[in-house]
Amino acid sequence: MSFISTLAAAHYVPFAPHNPSGPLSTAATLQLAAALPNFRYLEIMATDVPWRSDISDERLQLTAEGDVLVPDGVGLGVELDFDAIAEHPYTPHPMRIFSDAVADIRPPDARSYFNLERTVAAAGRADRTA
């Protein structure tokens, strides 16, 4: 992604990656975004499977402006619970690209994984608009 960002920056184009994935890829993308000068937005899902909080200690925080703070723990800022992950093995799903359900990618019991109980002031945030 940093290569794509560099190509975009050479033409004064902002960088806005798409990340519909889990906590590890979200943490990695947020860390990368904090280091890229032309980062603009990170497109992520607002809801996910109800057990997402069981498989990691990810607690994304939104500011009042809607920015996502970069996790500040060791490494990528999140830890995974491999025992909990093992309880939810990968299940293949049919491609939805040729049906009307192309945007129907979350289960009916999906819920937000953002820490909405604590809104953090924008001052001193480590990221740009995420």
Image (cartoon, helix red, strand yellow):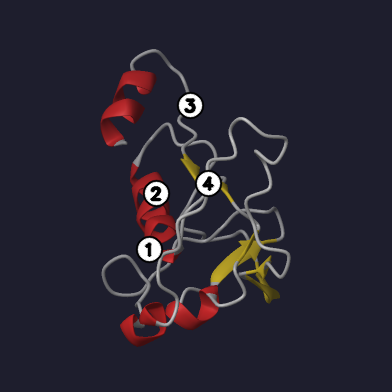
Task: First in sequence, mark 2 or 4: give its number.
Answer: 2
Circle on res. 5: none
Is 61 placed above or below 100 here?
A: below
Circle on res. 24: 1
Using the image as rendered, state which of residue 125 and residue 97 is in the foreground. Answer: 97
Is 44 placed above or below 12 here?
A: below
Task: First in sequence, mark 3 or 2: give its number.
Answer: 3
Query: Would residue 113 appear left or right of 7 to someone viewing this image?
Result: right
Going by the picture, which residue comes out furthest to the top? 11
Task: First in sequence, mark 1 or 3: give its number.
Answer: 3
Q: Residue at x 42, y 82 (%)?
A: 87
Which label lies toward us, 1 or 3? 1
Query: Which amino acid, mark 1?
Result: Leu
Disc 4 residue crowd, few under 14, some 14–19, many 20+, Cα 10 Å: few
Q: Tell me the CA gap for discs 4 and 3.
A: 33 Å
Task: First in sequence, mark 4 or 3: give its number.
Answer: 3
- Cβ atoms at labels 4 and 3 below 8 Å apart: no
Identify residue for label 4.
94
Query: Would residue 17 appear left or right of 129 to someone viewing this image?
Result: left
Which label lies toward us, 4 or 1? 4
Circle on res. 14: 3
- Cβ atoms at labels 2 and 1 below 8 Å apart: no
Identify residue for label 2.
34
Query: Which amino acid, mark 4?
Result: Pro
Q: Tell me the CA gap for discs 3 and 2.
A: 13 Å
Task: First in sequence, mark 4 or 1: give its number.
Answer: 1
Disc 2 residue crowd, few under 14, some 14–19, many 20+, Cα 10 Å: some
Q: Residue at x 45, y 76 (%)?
A: 88
Instruction: State the SS at label 1.
Output: helix
* Residue 113 on image: x %, y %: 61, 70
- Cβ atoms at labels 1 and 3 below 8 Å apart: no
Q: Tell me the CA gap for discs 2 and 1.
A: 16 Å
